[in-house]
């Protein structure tokens, strides 16, 4: 019996449906059973017209595709679950905690992003640290800021002096968290780069771009698992 691979997106009418049929078209080994589903799918929907068009351009017929909602049985019987985004992955892990060792984003699995969990943990830690720094800063200097704001309203003639003091304090806070904010931006960009963008509602050109990206990563997937 072959290895069961499940592609997952939101509605199972765009990304995951194209991924399923691209995989079927590229896989010549017949060692894999491939399906697709959506975390918020409605059962029995056809693939999006744009998806059918783009697949047809590749010589792949997906007119018989019928969407299906992700179920516990699908998760249980799948050996490998590949999602289009990090959010899809988290949704599956939240619903089916025991699936942790077989759920990955497609890009994460192909590119072997082993440090993804460490990255997301560090993002959470930086958010907490910034929040604590801000709270501590306001505890220490919040009253002074409020007094200065009140004086700013009451004494227009002193507005320049007050603004200078406010800018100094805000700059002090910005300096305190600047390094963490820069690191946060870097880490978030790494996580976002692991998503397959949703073409739903977009013109055919966007579906074409999505299909090309899926084909690129599924070729890499086949190289990895064969």
Image (cartoon, rainbow, N blue to C red):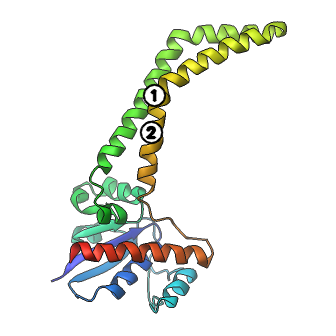
Of residues 28 and 3, the one nearer the viewer is: 28
Which quadrant does the N terminus fall into? bottom left
Query: Residue 62: x and y, percent?
Result: 45, 88
Identify the element where label 2 is drawn: helix
Task: Identify the residue shown where x is 36% and y is 45%.
Answer: 120
Task: Identify the residue shown where x is 51% and y is 66%.
Answer: 198
Residue at the left extreme of this rendering: 1
Q: Describe residue 159's horizontal placement relative to residue 38 as left or right.
A: right
Of residues 222 and 207, the one nearer the viewer is: 222
Quadrant location of residue 157? top right
Nearest to viewer (mark 2 / mark 1): 2
Disc 2 and disc 1 in contact, CB within 8 angstroms? yes
Q: Earlier in the sequence, mark 2 or mark 1?
A: 1
- The answer to whether 181 is drawn above or below residue 33 in the figure is above
Q: Describe residue 132's horizontal placement relative to residue 150 as left or right.
A: left
Crowdedness of circle 1 by 10 Å Cα count: few (<14), some, many (20+)?
some
Question: Circle 2 is placed at which residue position?
Answer: 184
- The answer to whether 186 is drawn above or below residue 35 in the figure is above
Query: Residue 14: x and y, percent?
Result: 49, 75
Query: Residue 112: x and y, percent?
Result: 28, 60
Task: Identify the residue shown where x is 22% and y is 56%.
Answer: 98
Mark number displayed over residue 130: 1
Identify the element where label 1 is drawn: helix
Task: Determine the CA span between mark 2 and mark 1.
Answer: 10 Å
Q: Describe residue 32's horizontal placement relative to residue 147 as left or right.
A: left
Mark number displayed over residue 66: none
Residue 68 makes an appearance in the image: no
Task: Identify the residue shown where x is 50% and y is 64%.
Answer: 197
What count of labels does the image hold?
2
């Amino acid at each position: 019996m072959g290895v069961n691979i499940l592609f997952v997106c939101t509605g199972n009418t765009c990304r995951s449906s194209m991924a399923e049929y691209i995989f079927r078209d590229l896989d010549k080994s017949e060692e894999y059973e491939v399906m697709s589903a959506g975390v918020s799918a409605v059962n029995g929907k056809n693939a999006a017209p744009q998806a059918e068009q783009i697949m047809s351009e590749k010589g792949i017929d997906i007119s018989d595709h019928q969407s299906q909602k992700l179920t516990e049985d699908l998760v249980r019987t799948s050996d490998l679950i590949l999602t289009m985004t990090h959010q899809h992955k988290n949704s599956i892990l939240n619903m089916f905690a025991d699936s942790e060792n077989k759920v990955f984003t497609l890009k994460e699995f192909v590119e072997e992003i082993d440090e993804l969990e460490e990255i997301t943990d560090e993002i959470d830690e930086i958010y907490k640290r910034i929040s604590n720094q801000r709270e501590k800063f306001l505890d220490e200097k919040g009253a002074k800021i409020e007094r200065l704001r009140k004086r700013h309203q009451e004494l227009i003639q002193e507005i320049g002096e007050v603004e200078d003091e406010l800018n100094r304090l805000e700059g002090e806070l910005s300096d305190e968290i600047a390094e963490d904010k820069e690191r946060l931006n870097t880490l978030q960009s790494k996580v976002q780069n692991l998503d397959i963008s949703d073409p739903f509602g977009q013109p055919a050109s966007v579906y074409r771009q999505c299909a090309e990206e899926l084909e690129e990563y599924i070729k890499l997937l086949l190289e990895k698992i064969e």
